[in-house]
Image (cartoon, rainbow, N blue to C red):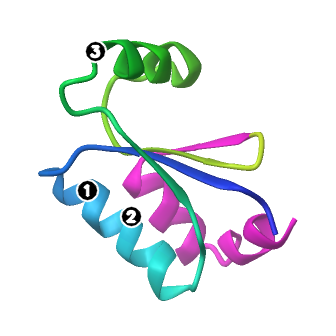
């Protein structure tokens, strides 16, 4: 099972949707909150090339945000990534 990391913000509806999908699949994930932590947000932005949250990694692979996660799910590719 790949390690899943989600950079998120407390009041972000997209973060909530992404975490909900992972939780519904029974996926344990590490959540890194960026609220009030400019250094952590900057590190996430540098790593992801994006400033928005959520930013999601499965193993070493950067998935992107909530829409990207749901697109993988709709395409039937998310489960295989999670199991890799």
Pointer 1 with pointer 2, Cβ within 8 A: yes
Q: Residue at x 50, y 60 (%)?
A: 69
Pointer 3 with pointer 2, Cβ within 8 A: no
Label 3 CA crowd tier, 10 Å (few <14, some 14–19, many 20+): few
Q: Is residue 27 left or right of residue 33?
A: right
Q: How many numbered circles are shown? A: 3
Q: Secondary structure at mark 3?
A: helix
Residues 72 and 22: in front is 22
Can you say whether 23 is above or below 16 in the image? below
Q: Which residue does the numbered mark 3 point to in the structure image? A: 38
Q: Residue at x 50, y 73 (%)?
A: 22
Q: Secondary structure at mark 2?
A: helix
The magenta stretch spans which residues?
A: 61-84
Quarter that holds the N terminus: bottom right
Q: Determine if the magenta segment contains residue 63.
A: yes
Label 2 CA crowd tier, 10 Å (few <14, some 14–19, many 20+): many
Q: Quadrant of residue 21?
A: bottom left
Q: Which residue does the numbered mark 1 point to in the structure image? A: 14
Q: Which residue does the numbered mark 2 point to in the structure image? A: 18
């Amino acid at each position: 099972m790949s390690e899943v990391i989600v950079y998120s913000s407390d009041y972000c509806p997209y973060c909530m949707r992404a975490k909900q999908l992972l939780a519904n699949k029974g996926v344990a994930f590490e959540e890194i909150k960026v609220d009030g932590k400019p250094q952590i947000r900057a590190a996430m932005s540098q790593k992801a090339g994006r400033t928005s949250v959520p930013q999601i990694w499965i193993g070493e692979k950067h998935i992107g945000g909530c829409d990207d996660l749901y697109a993988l799910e709709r395409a039937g590719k998310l489960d295989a990534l999670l199991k890799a």
